[in-house]
């Protein structure tokens, strides 16, 4: 094979790779900057041995980015936690995301009263999942159910929010989750 | 491999690095200067899942806003410089008054060498558009000050027009307007 032919083949192979590299030079900084966006999370109070020393219930937001769950916020007011998020317009399907981390640092059991609802009815079935157990928050007809969750002492739980709809949802909706210790 | 691709790849490296560095340094410098406690974690799985956490929502809002502004400035200054340089160079070819003014401000170097190509201006503008897009998205989701979002929008429009003007100048070199011949 002649030298010029080898060069031609090499150019054919290398050029798409360079195109890909050029695209990556735009994609990587964009993803990095999106991930560098700081989020609010209460930091653990650590003692000299690096252990948490506060015997209380800790609820923190997991955060991160998700296609459907956006603008997540967690506010605490007089022992009641209010988690809010915007559920983006979506195709009919089931979506879920870890939203809250609940830690019971106490030496005794604690029960939480949890209820959540959307401000507009969109025929969505909204549930939460804790330790693979599914709890319904809002049924497709809009009925809201209050759930009571028992937290064992010194245990950590990840609360997942799951949403399922059988028809496409064209608009965004606000979802609110209220958590109270009883 | 085409020269255009090689040059595009070479010219994209600096703005890509500046974009990440502007955001990251903005967060870390602010945290170090004001002593904001921050935590780096990766509670969500997958690639690029590293998150920066702050304790207070107000601090998160402030740090995110200022780091967005630093990233915007890091990309906007070189882009505006490139556009101004091209505009001054073109103006000096037609108007001797510009040369006098440029000499007065001691920036004669800007018009003695036409080393600013459309490709360079376009690539810097493209990174600025991406950066502005991210800032506007953050502003809409309530994570950045509104005035920073408006500034980002205005700068990206201005730089877009500048890049368009540079493109016009480049195309005039290839296809000069008819009026030049009469």
Image: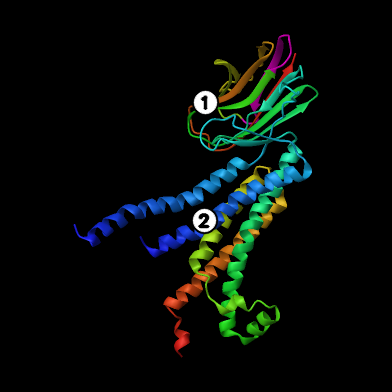
Q: Nearer the viewer, mark 2 or mark 1?
A: 2
The residue identified by callout 1 is A164
Residue B158 visible in image:
no
Q: Secondary structure at mark 2?
A: helix
User: Do the residues at pointers 2 and 1 share their chain?
Assistant: no
Q: Which mark is residue B40?
A: none
Q: Position of residue A177 (x, y in %)?
A: 67, 25
Q: Quadrant of the C terminus of chain A?
A: top right
Nearest the viewer among B93 and A99 is: B93
Image vertical order of residue B6 relative to residue A112, above or below: below
Q: Which residue is mark 2?
A: B13
For the point 45% across and 77% down, the residue is B173
Q: Nearer the viewer, residue A105 or A128?
A: A105
**Does the magenta run of residues contain A115?**
yes
In the image, the segment drawn in magenta is: A104-120
Residue A74, by quadrant, is: top right
Q: Is residue A41 above or below residue B8?
A: above
């Amino acid at each position: 094979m002649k030298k010029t032919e080898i060069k031609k083949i090499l150019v054919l192979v290398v050029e798409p790779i360079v195109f890909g590299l050029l695209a990556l030079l735009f994609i990587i900084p964009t993803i990095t900057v999106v991930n560098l966006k700081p989020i609010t999370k209460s930091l653990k109070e650590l003692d000299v041995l690096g252990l948490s020393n506060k015997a209380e219930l800790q609820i923190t937001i997991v955060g991160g980015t998700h296609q459907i769950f956006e603008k997540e916020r967690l506010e605490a007011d007089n022992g009641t936690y209010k988690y809010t998020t915007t559920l983006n317009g979506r195709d009919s399907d089931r979506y879920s995301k870890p939203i809250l981390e609940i830690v019971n640092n106490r030496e005794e059991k604690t029960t939480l009263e949890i209820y959540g609802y959307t401000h507009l009815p969109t025929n969505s079935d909204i549930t939460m999942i804790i330790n693979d157990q599914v709890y319904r928050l809002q049924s497709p007809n809009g009925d809201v159910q209050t759930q009571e969750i028992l937290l064992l002492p010194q245990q950590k739980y990840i609360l997942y929010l799951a949403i399922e709809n059988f028809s496409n949802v064209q608009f965004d909706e606000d979802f609110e989750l209220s958590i109270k210790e009883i | 491999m085409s020269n255009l691709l090689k040059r595009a790849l070479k010219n994209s490296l600096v703005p890509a690095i500046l974009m990440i560095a502007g955001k990251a340094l903005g967060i870390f410098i602010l945290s170090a200067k004001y002593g904001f406690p921050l935590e780096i974690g990766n509670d969500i799985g997958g690639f690029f899942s590293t998150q920066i956490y702050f304790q207070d929502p107000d601090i998160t809002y402030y740090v995110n806003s200022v780091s967005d502004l630093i990233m915007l400035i890091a990309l906007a200054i070189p882009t505006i410089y490139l556009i101004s340089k091209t505009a001054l160079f073109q103006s000096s070819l037609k108007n001797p008054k510009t040369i006098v003014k440029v000499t007065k401000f001691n920036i004669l170097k800007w018009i003695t060498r036409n080393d600013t190509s459309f490709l360079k201006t376009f690539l810097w503008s493209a990174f600025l558009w991406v950066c502005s897009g991210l800032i506007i998205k953050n502003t809409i989701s309530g994570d950045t000050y509104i005035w920073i979002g408006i500034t980002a929008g205005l700068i990206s429009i201005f730089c877009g027009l500048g890049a368009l003007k540079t493109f016009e100048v480049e195309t005039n070199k290839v296809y000069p307007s008819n009026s030049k011949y009469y």
